[in-house]
């Protein structure tokens, strides 16, 4: 029931987001048809704007986005006008959905793998640094995780390329053609999140180790390793779980920096370029896509809480 | 356990996501941007042109070495004595890559489609030279049969022009005038380029086009000159980052890198020493626009003073550094039958004198003004910004005037141009064909590319007179008078330097690629040298 209600509330939320995105792209200076070569005559410019309905009042353009416009045709009959959400002003031979269909799976693969990497590296690292608190393993591990968080991907990626692709020729420098091509971008993208997960996991473990139920279990004579691995971990992982919703939404929708450096045909570059190009519909579509992912993933996170922590219940 | 999950997940995702088995290309070319479109009627950018000329051809095409027009789909033509009527004779063996014949009707259809108001083509003004072309493009006449192009029989196209147009055969090689498949367009509308197989009439067919990934062209065996198409498969990659382009090239994943902007700025000095980095003269000029509708820039003396106070030599030596030449004129050297007039040089003393005459001795009382420029795309090198800072300093030191810098996004700059919402702004122009008109025409009073507010009846009259003049020598002289007005007397613009073309490839591995002033590279001659194992 709770989750159904959340889903229903998501609809007005998305409407608000779409309206905001719509207003913002139109507020930004420079339009889709401000081009390097000026149109041969003002008539041509007017024709172009009329063909894409950019000359209409904004509210009408907004309704048209959803396909909620009916117009009188030449014979005076009311006709449904097609929705405009799928139109790209920049890529005029393609639909936004064509581009998303090609590019999103690539970004999802890249992001999914980076997520796995972040978890596979971050969780054990966080666990070890917490379990060995104050010893050299803690200092080394914490240093590494802070480093991963602090050094941005546009520094990590060229360094990785320099060492593994240009010096040693182990891996390709760029492009997206085989599993080998995925290793460097996944690492460059995943390291930041691995560091973040390790920090969260460490905090979570430390809190869990001081909590009453762990003390109680220890008093009952439970072995230290069982205690940590079986009991403490389950609550320690909760901050990581809540972070993983937005993190996954972030990762799955691609990264401008990584896709640019490795020439990966993902959706991340379109997020940035569509707004620079004043490709209005694509900008709004992508904003909504991101919003939907965020809402759905946060729902999944909240749901997984009930599985991990028996204290959490949604009414 | 976690590691195990990671491995399994990785394997599944990789297996599903990024394994591709493809035939390797014969030649891989790095182009600097994802094509907006491949429809010859609407494209206007160089990355698009580079691909489109492989797919669609016009009545003429450009010679790869000289960039001069040579017979394309037309095997020859007759020109009437007054230079106003062109009769093109199509080759009789022309077919689309899908097998259907290409006729004169297809040519007429393609031109009228590109010229139609509904198409709103950026290059529609090239049809203004046709009889009734302007009226048709701007929607003043609706009847296409009034336009000066028609098919007199299956293989003959008769073109009627308003006046003798010296560069008309050059125009026929522009993508906007190339021939496109009527039936496919009728069937698929504006998504016709997604149709497979896509009928093409050029040396290549479109194998596939994956956004931001790759365009693959394969040889069109039915092209009239297929015997001279040297590569079977050409891949074109839209790489925008110069570092990535250089990395791919160095690792042998790309054979040719085709853009000046794809040479990393920090490495320019080192790379230019290498034998595989080639620079060449190019028809393009970097210049500054004045908004002459704003004070004090409505005074030609002020504009000339600002121009005379710029040490352009310093800009090309210190900032651009690829061998660019300082420019005193808008038209670069290298256009056909034209030598630009002498312009203004660097003369700070004269500049100060002019500024004093205009009422601002030592720059006193000169209002603060703003210089607008765009951020380089894709995080590339900051040439525009560096030039802006240099100008700011030169004008302060030489004239005692203060300028503010304003960096904006590209679209904002373009919008400011068209609304004349700037004081000074950086700009540039690249020639479409090797004739001075492609530059000078922009500054006619009512041209949309004028973008300075400068209107000069004498200039307009000179350009029109030049274009009506059949004698190429006299025509050149009239253009010189016009350009003298533009870059010496009136100066609505200050030319800064002539662009230089720059590309990189190993001449021992790649052949059939030539440098020309238009940076135009027909794909059919490009091929890799076969190495004997």
Image: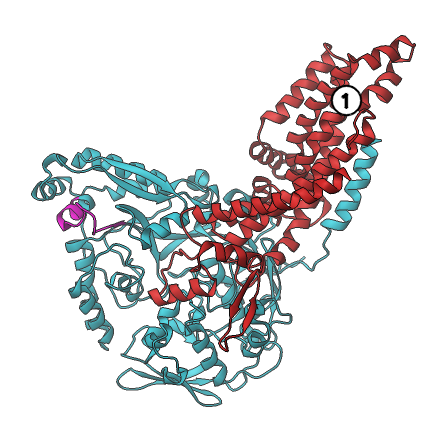
Chain colours: A red, B cyan
Specify the farthest residue to the left: B357
Query: In the rendered view of the protein, which quadrant contains the C terminus of chain B?
Result: bottom right
In this orientation, does residue A263 appear? no
Picture coordinates of residue B385, whole percent (x, y): 36, 39
Please state which of residues B315 and A43 is positioned toward the viewer in this rendering.
Answer: A43
Q: Residues within 10 Å of mark 1 (few under 14, many from 20)?
A: many
- Residue A99 falls in image quadrant: bottom right
What are the residue bounds of the magenta stretch? Answer: B289-305
Q: Is residue B299 magenta?
A: yes
At x 72%, y 15%, the residue is A138
Picture coordinates of residue B48, whole percent (x, y): 49, 61
| A144 shown above or below B493 | above
In this orientation, does residue B346 appear? yes
Q: Is residue B369 magenta?
A: no
- Residue B467 falls in image quadrant: bottom left
At x 77%, y 41%, the residue is B10
Q: How many marks?
A: 1
Please state which of residues B371 and B25 is positioned toward the viewer in this rendering.
Answer: B371
- Give the SS element for disc 1: helix
Horizontal arrangement in the rendering, residue A88 relative to residue A100 (left or right): left
Q: Which residue is mark 1?
A: A236
Please state which of residues B237 and B524 is positioned toward the viewer in this rendering.
Answer: B237
Horizontal arrangement in the rendering, residue B363 relative to residue B335 (left or right): left
């Amino acid at each position: 029931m709770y989750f159904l209600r959340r889903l229903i509330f998501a609809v007005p939320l998305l409407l608000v987001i779409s309206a905001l995105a719509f207003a913002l792209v139109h507020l930004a200076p420079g339009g889709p048809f401000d081009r390097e070569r000026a149109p041969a005559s003002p008539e041509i410019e007017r024709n172009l704007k009329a063909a894409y309905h950019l000359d209409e009042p904004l509210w009408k353009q907004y309704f048209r986005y959803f396909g909620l416009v009916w117009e009188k045709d030449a014979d005076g009959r009311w006709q449904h006008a097609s929705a405009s959400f799928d139109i790209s002003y920049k890529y005029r031979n393609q639909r936004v959905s064509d581009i998303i269909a090609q590019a999103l799976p690539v970004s999802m693969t890249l992001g999914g793998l980076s997520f796995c990497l972040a978890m596979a590296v971050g969780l054990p690292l966080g666990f070890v640094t917490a379990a060995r608190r104050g010893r050299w393993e803690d200092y080394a591990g914490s240093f590494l995780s802070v480093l991963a968080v602090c050094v941005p991907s546009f520094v990590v990626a060229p360094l990785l390329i320099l060492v593994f692709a240009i010096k040693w020729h182990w891996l390709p420098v760029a492009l997206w053609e085989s599993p080998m091509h995925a290793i460097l971008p996944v690492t460059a993208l995943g390291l930041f999140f691995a560091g973040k997960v390790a920090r969260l996991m460490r905090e979570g473990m430390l809190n869990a180790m001081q909590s009453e139920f762990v003390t109680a279990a220890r008093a009952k004579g439970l072995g230290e390793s069982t205690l940590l691995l079986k009991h403490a971990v389950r609550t320690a992982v909760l901050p990581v779980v809540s972070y993983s919703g937005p993190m996954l939404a972030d990762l799955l929708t691609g990264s401008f920096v990584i896709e640019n450096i490795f020439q990966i045909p993902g959706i991340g570059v379109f997020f940035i370029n569509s707004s620079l190009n004043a490709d209005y519909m694509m900008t709004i579509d992508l904003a909504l896509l991101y919003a939907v992912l965020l809402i759905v993933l946060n729902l999944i996170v909240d749901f997984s809480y009930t599985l991990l922590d028996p204290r959490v219940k949604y009414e | 356990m976690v590691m195990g999950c990671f491995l399994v997940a990785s394997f599944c995702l990789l297996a599903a996501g990024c394994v591709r088995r493809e035939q390797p290309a014969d030649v891989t070319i790095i182009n600097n941007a994802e094509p907006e479109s491949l429809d010859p009627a609407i494209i206007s950018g160089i990355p698009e042109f580079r691909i489109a000329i492989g797919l669609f051809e016009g009545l003429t095409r450009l010679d790869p070495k000289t960039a001069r027009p040579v017979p394309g789909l037309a095997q020859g033509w007759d020109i009437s004595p007054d230079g106003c009527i062109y009769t093109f004779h199509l080759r009789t063996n022309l077919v689309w890559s899908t097998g259907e014949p290409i006729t004169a009707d297809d040519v007429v259809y393609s031109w009228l489609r590109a010229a139609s108001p509904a198409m709103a083509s950026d290059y529609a003004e090239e049809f203004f030279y046709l009889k009734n072309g302007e009226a048709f493009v701007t929607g003043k006449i609706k009847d296409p049969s009034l336009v000066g192009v028609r098919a007199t029989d299956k293989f003959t196209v008769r073109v009627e022009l308003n006046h003798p147009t010296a560069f008309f055969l050059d125009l026929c090689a522009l993508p906007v005038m190339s021939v496109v498949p009527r039936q496919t367009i009728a069937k698929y509308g504006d998504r016709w380029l997604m149709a497979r197989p896509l009928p093409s009439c050029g040396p290549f067919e479109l194998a596939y086009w994956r956004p931001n990934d790759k365009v693959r062209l394969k040889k069109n065996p039915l092209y009239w000159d297929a015997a001279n198409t040297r590569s079977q498969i050409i891949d074109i990659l839209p790489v925008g980052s110069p570092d990535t382009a250089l990395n791919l090239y160095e690792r042998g994943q790309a054979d040719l890198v085709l853009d000046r902007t794809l040479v990393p700025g920090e490495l320019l000095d080192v790379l230019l020493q290498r034998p595989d980095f080639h620079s060449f003269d190019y028809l393009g000029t970097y210049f500054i626009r004045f908004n002459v509708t704003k004070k004090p820039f409505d005074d030609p003396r002020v504009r000339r003073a600002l121009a005379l106070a710029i040490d352009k030599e310093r800009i090309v030596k210190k900032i651009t550094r690829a061998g660019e030449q300082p420019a005193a004129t808008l038209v670069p050297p290298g256009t056909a039958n034209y030598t630009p007039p002498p312009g203004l040089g660097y003369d700070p003393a004269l500049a100060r004198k002019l500024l004093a005459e205009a009422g601002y001795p030592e720059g006193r009382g000169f209002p603060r003004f703003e210089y607008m420029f765009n951020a380089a795309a894709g995080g590339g090198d900051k040439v525009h910004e560096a030039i802006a800072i240099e100008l700011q300093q030169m004008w302060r030191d030489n004239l005692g005037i203060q300028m503010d810098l304003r960096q904006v996004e590209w679209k904002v700059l373009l919008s400011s141009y068209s609304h004349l919402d700037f004081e000074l702004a950086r700009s540039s122009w690249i020639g479409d064909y090797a004739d001075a008109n492609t530059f000078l025409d922009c500054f006619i009073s009512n041209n949309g590319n004028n973008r300075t507010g400068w209107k000069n009846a004498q200039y307009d009259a000179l350009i029109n007179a030049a274009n009506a003049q059949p004698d190429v020598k006299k025509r050149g002289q009239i253009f010189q008078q016009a350009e003298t007005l533009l870059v010496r007397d009136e100066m609505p613009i200050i030319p800064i330097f002539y662009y230089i073309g720059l590309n990189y490839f190993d001449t021992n591995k790649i052949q059939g690629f030539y440098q020309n002033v238009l940076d135009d590279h027909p794909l059919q001659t490009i091929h890799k040298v076969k190495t004997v194992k």
